[in-house]
Amino acid sequence: MRTPDILAKLGLTQVADGGTVSGVYAGRWIESPAGETITSLDPATGQVLGRVTMGGADDYEATVASAQEAFQRWRQLPAPKRGELVRLCGEALREHRDALGALVTLEMGKILPEGVGEVIEMIDIADFSVGLSRQLYGLSMHSERPGHRMYEQWHPLGVMGIISAFNFPVAVWSWNAFVAAVAGDTMIWKPSPVTPLCAVAVQNIVNPVMESEGFGGVFNLCVGDVDPVGETMIADRRLPLISATGSVRMGKRVGEVVGGRLGRSLLELGGNNALAIMDDANLELALRGVLFGAVGTAGQRCTSTRRVLLHESVADEFTERLTRAYGTIPIGNPMDGKTLCGPLASQAAVDGFLAAIETVKGQGGELLCGGGRATVPGGEGGFYVEPTLVRAPTDLPMMQEETFAPLLYLVTVSDIEEAIAVQNGVPQGLSSAVFTSNLQTAERFLSYAGSDCGIANVNIGTSGAEIGGAFGGEKDTGGGREAGSDSWKAYMRRQTCTINGTDELPLAQGISFG
């Protein structure tokens, strides 16, 4: 499918013809937003994909008004009815799966199977949310007072803000938006300015579904800069919840401002994920797990494998096999079916990667392969780098930081205890994994004294979580949970109710008053 055809299928014909589209949807498209116009680039070529006009202060106010008005009506719709509209949104995504997946690849740079896979994840979370709409359960408790009944129920929270990152430009929105929608919330989406076309395309897909039922203001969009949109959003008391995905630096700012107004924040921040390979591991299985974890999405997943902790008895053999495998990785245009590693998302990402390499070498890391820009035929303007392996001591300072690129550290450890200590010895706590054939080793890794991450895997890699489980991490990763399990509770408020069915008024704890 040609780029103009992809854009046209997603309602971006104006962009396909060289024009500019609006980045503000407040129950309807704002034709002339007051913000600046930003340019979206194809990271594979550096060429312009399209232009989007961002929102200004008044445009943000319009999105809040739209979301507030829709919330008053949306929360009154029974949850299963809300689920039905989310189901229809999922059907609309199915119809546009290939085109939207291709746009993700074009604008973000992940290879095409990953781009399409991201849209499949949206469809999956829509299906999950439909079932969830009939399962927003509260508990029933036994009262200590005769003739009294206690139970809890859950109510919609209100208008929420969604701040998403460039690396998953559509899926993370759906994790929040579809679950929050069946919970009865409405929302305002501030996407990454690196991938604004993906956000506009998603709105174009779900808008007809919602508008046909009179609920166009449930999903609102305001592409905008930190000022006036971002800072205004996180300080806005009308938004009881801000869900933010991005860097630790960004998350600390969100947490500080939202906490200062006693609002709720759901933070999904950096990962610095380690994968331990023990002496009894299936090395072929581990090799595949490391390759996808470290090179998938060109190392730009929050769950990407950053550190491999090798038992000393297998360190040399595995390092040799991994180094050989790295030499065969096809780097190129992500739309090419033979490519396994596409470009980074921007020139800034390339600069950060190259600076990290120099720092690592200065700190004593041994460069085994890669470390520079990659040359790709036809991609002279693209943002390509070489997947890189570094042999590192356990105390290499740079390993405390997350480099959002295909940079992988190999560290030798003596046993599972040292592996756990090194794994946990960083500020972040998102995803972790161990490869072992020993049940006791696996259980040790999963125990209360094992991995301190929100995700802990055995004999699979750190990357590629399913939507059925709660996704998120601890420490500097932010503590938030999205997608499956009981993550829906973040989008609702709990209410404990007690009903007295007698003519008496006994007090709890046996207190006698008067």
Image (spheres, rainbow, N blue to C red):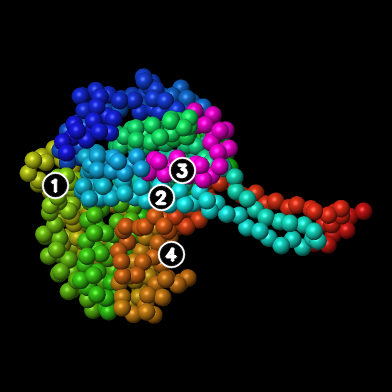
Q: Earlier in the sequence, mark 2 or mark 1?
A: 2
Dot in front, 3 or 4: 3
Instruction: Looking at the picture, tell me which residue is in the foreground, 412 or 280.
Output: 280
Q: Secondary structure at mark 1?
A: loop
Residue drawn at (45%, 28%), measured in percent from left and top?
A: 27
**Tag on residue 127?**
2
Q: Position of residue 133 (x, y in %)?
A: 50, 48
Residue closer to the observer: 456 or 11: 11
Query: Which residue was labeled with disc 4?
Result: 452
For the residue marked with disc 4, what is the amino acid? Asp
- Looking at the picture, does residue 11 appear above or below residue 102? above
For the record, the magenta segment spans 66-90
Quadrant of the rendered image containing residue 96: top left
- The amino acid type found where label 2 is placed reads Asp
Residue drawn at x 14%, y 57% is: 329
Residue 80 in sight in this render: yes
Mark toward the viewer: 4 or 2: 2
Q: Nearer the viewer, mark 1 or mark 3?
A: 3
Dot 4 surroundings within 10 Å: few (below 14), some, or many (20 or more)? many
Look at the image and tell me whether residue 252 can be seen.
Answer: no
Mark 4 to mark 2: distance in Å?
31 Å
Dot 4 falls on a residue whose secondary structure is: loop
Per the model, the C-alpha gap separating discs 2 and 1 is 30 Å
The three-letter code of the residue at mark 3 reads Glu
Residue matched to label 1: 336
Residue 101 rendering spot, x and y as whole percentages: 26, 43
